[in-house]
């Protein structure tokens, strides 16, 4: 599905004057830089919009670009009331395209200093306390079709803090039940090893022994989590599973896969885990991304202050 969407964007790009260099750039990102299909699709959309804008401005080649076009395009995105993160991603994609064009010798002047990207605010992520998470994890029961699979998905999400695309791509061989670890392939296809607790391992074992065989088909291959038709359980279905049980547990429809990832990190840090270890488990390239979780556990800080400060 994703690959079909990407190819559709590529075809649309090929019909535009700047399309050839953009497609070449996307190939570079996909093959040499190991960009994930989700990010590649986002960049293809952003650069297709940019190519259409350049075409309307009369820029037929990448060398026709000038600072004025870049300034005005950034202003256009702001006028369209796009969210800050979307504008930022679009401008980053354009900046990378310009750097690539400079490297390829299609530009003689570095235009990247003229790219304005909005400063991204650090938002404190929404997390849920341990009691709420426990309610969610205990929600799947025998009245639910494929409840062993659903329970295993929820347990693995909370036990590892994995992204939705990462858990969708998990294979049986990625699980090492003897030593309690799983192998995960994250952004840029980077491999990392994440510990698995006893409860998550038991949930996976129950699913493998008592349910997965009934879902398996010739097309299933080694994918760990399968849909009722035997296909890989994709990102959308995983989101639906989390939302379904969150609503049923009385936690509302705001609890998502990301909420479990945020809660995983916050609970580890509040329990005394060091920041570097949490960074490695989350697969963050930069530790400053992980540091946002140090600001989340305010209740714990208040308790410490109350307990130890002489005038609290």
Image: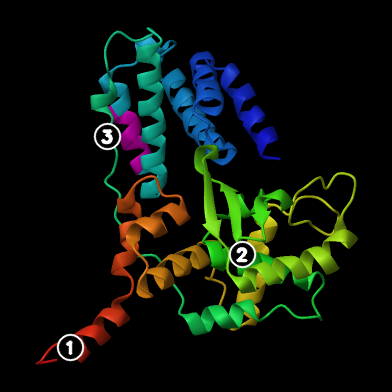
Magenta highlight: main SS: helix
Specify the quadrant of the image occupied by residue 63: top left
Residue 308 image label: 1
How far, Cα to Cα, is label 1 from label 2? Answer: 37 Å
2 or 3: tag closer to the N-terminus? 3
Q: Identify the residue position indicated by label 2 in the image.
A: 156
Which contiguous range is marked in magenta?
71-78
Q: Is residue 233 left or right of residue 183?
A: right
User: How was this image coloured?
Assistant: rainbow
Between discs 3 and 1, the one toward the N terminus? 3
Residue 163: name its quadrant. bottom right
Report the front residue among 105 and 178.
178
Q: Secondary structure at mark 3?
A: loop
Q: How many marks?
A: 3
Quick check: is 73 in the magenta stretch? Answer: yes
The residue that mark 3 highlights is 116
Residue drawn at the location 59% of the way across and 37% of the way down: 37
Q: Residues within 10 Å of mark 1 (few under 14, many from 20)?
A: few
């Amino acid at each position: 599905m994703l690959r079909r969407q990407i190819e559709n964007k590529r075809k649309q790009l090929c019909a535009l004057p700047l399309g050839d260099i953009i497609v070449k750039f996307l190939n570079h990102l996909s093959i040499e830089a190991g960009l994930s299909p989700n990010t590649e699709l986002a960049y293809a959309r952003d650069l297709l919009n940019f190519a259409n804008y350049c075409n309307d401005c009369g820029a037929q080649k990448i060398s026709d670009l000038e600072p004025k076009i870049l300034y005005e395009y950034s202003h256009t995105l702001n006028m369209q009331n796009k969210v800050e993160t979307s504008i930022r991603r679009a401008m980053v994609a354009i900046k990378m395209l310009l750097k690539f064009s400079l490297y390829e010798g299609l530009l003689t002047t570095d235009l990247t200093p003229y790219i304005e990207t909005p400063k991204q605010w650090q938002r404190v992520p929404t997390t849920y306390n341990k009691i709420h998470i426990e309610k969610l994890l205990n929600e799947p029961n025998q009245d639910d079709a494929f409840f062993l699979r659903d329970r295993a998905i929820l347990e693995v999400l909370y036990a590892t803090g994995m992204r939705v695309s990462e858990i969708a791509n998990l294979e049986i061989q990625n699980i090492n039940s003897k030593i309690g670890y799983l192998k995960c392939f994250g952004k840029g296809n980077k491999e990392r090893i994440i510990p698995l607790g006893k409860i998550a391992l038991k949930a996976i074992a129950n699913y493998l022994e008592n349910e997965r065989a009934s879902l398996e088909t010739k097309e299933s291959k080694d994918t760990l989590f399968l849909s009722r038709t035997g296909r890989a359980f994709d990102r959308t279905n995983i989101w639906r599973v989390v939302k379904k049980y969150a609503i049923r547990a009385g936690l509302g429809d705001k609890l998502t896969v990301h909420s479990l990832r945020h809660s995983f990190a916050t609970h580890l840090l509040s329990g005394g885990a060091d920041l570097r270890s949490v960074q490695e488990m989350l697969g963050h390239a930069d530790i400053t991304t992980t540091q946002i979780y140090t600001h989340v556990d305010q209740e714990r800080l208040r308790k410490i202050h109350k307990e130890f400060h002489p005038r609290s």
